[in-house]
Image (spheres, rainbow, N blue to C red):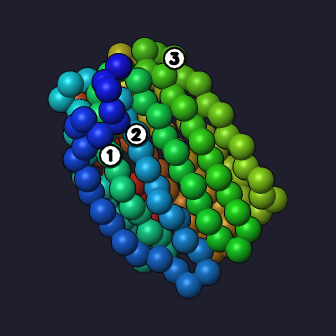
Amino acid sequence: MVSSIYDRVPFLLIGQHLPDIHLIDLQFFLWGCSNSLVDEIPVSSHNILVDEIPVSSDNFLVYEIPVSSDNFLVCEIPVCIDNILVCEIPVPNDNILVYEMPTSNDNILVCEIPVFNDNFLVYEILLSNDNFLVDEIPVT
């Protein structure tokens, strides 16, 4: 494993938010192949704050997704990439809980993480292990 998650850190910062719902400090720690990169993260709405997306390398992938609103939601989702998926999702909130993470073989991981709140934030995260492309996060 690399000595620091910041050894290879491309950043893409997008800042948008709603008055009462904030997706704060959305961090994807991707330890993948040596050519890891963050490519395109379009946000197709103005109700989300996306912040700090560091990328590093070494054959596995970890997300930390803190989400804050009037009620507090914290998701910590460790994922191991050798066609093995492990998820831990503590969610201390009654309002927000929908989570799907389908995976397939051939080193391709597809994550769909719909988060439903009073204002219905929905976003998808598609990840590929061909140089760890973080493809898109649409928000509707």
Instruction: Please name the residue shown 46% across and 55% down the image.
Output: 26
Res. 129 in view: no
Q: Quadrant of residue 42?
A: bottom left
Figure check: 54 above or below 31: below
Whether residues under marks 2 and 1 lie with C-beta atoms below 8 angstroms apart, the answer is yes
Instruction: Please name the residue shown 32% across and 26% down the image.
Output: 3
Which residue in the structure is indicated by mark 1?
54
Specify the quadrant that holds the N terminus.
top left
Give the secondary structure at mark 2: strand
Whether residues under marks 1 and 3 lie with C-beta atoms below 8 angstroms apart, the answer is no
Which residue in the structure is indicated by mark 3?
84
Q: Residue furthest left?
A: 35
| x and y, in percent, of residue 83 in the image | 46, 16
The front one of 102 and 32 is: 32
Which residue in the structure is indicated by mark 2?
29
Determine crowd level at label 3: few under 14, some 14-19, many 20+ residues with C-alpha closer than 10 A. Answer: few
Q: Is residue 21 left or right of residue 37?
A: right
For the residue marked with disc 3, what is the amino acid? Ile
For the residue marked with disc 2, what is the amino acid? Phe
| x and y, in percent, of residue 118 in the image | 69, 73
The front one of 38 and 102 is: 38
| x and y, in percent, of residue 127 in the image | 37, 37
**Alpha carbon distance from label 2 to label 1:** 6 Å
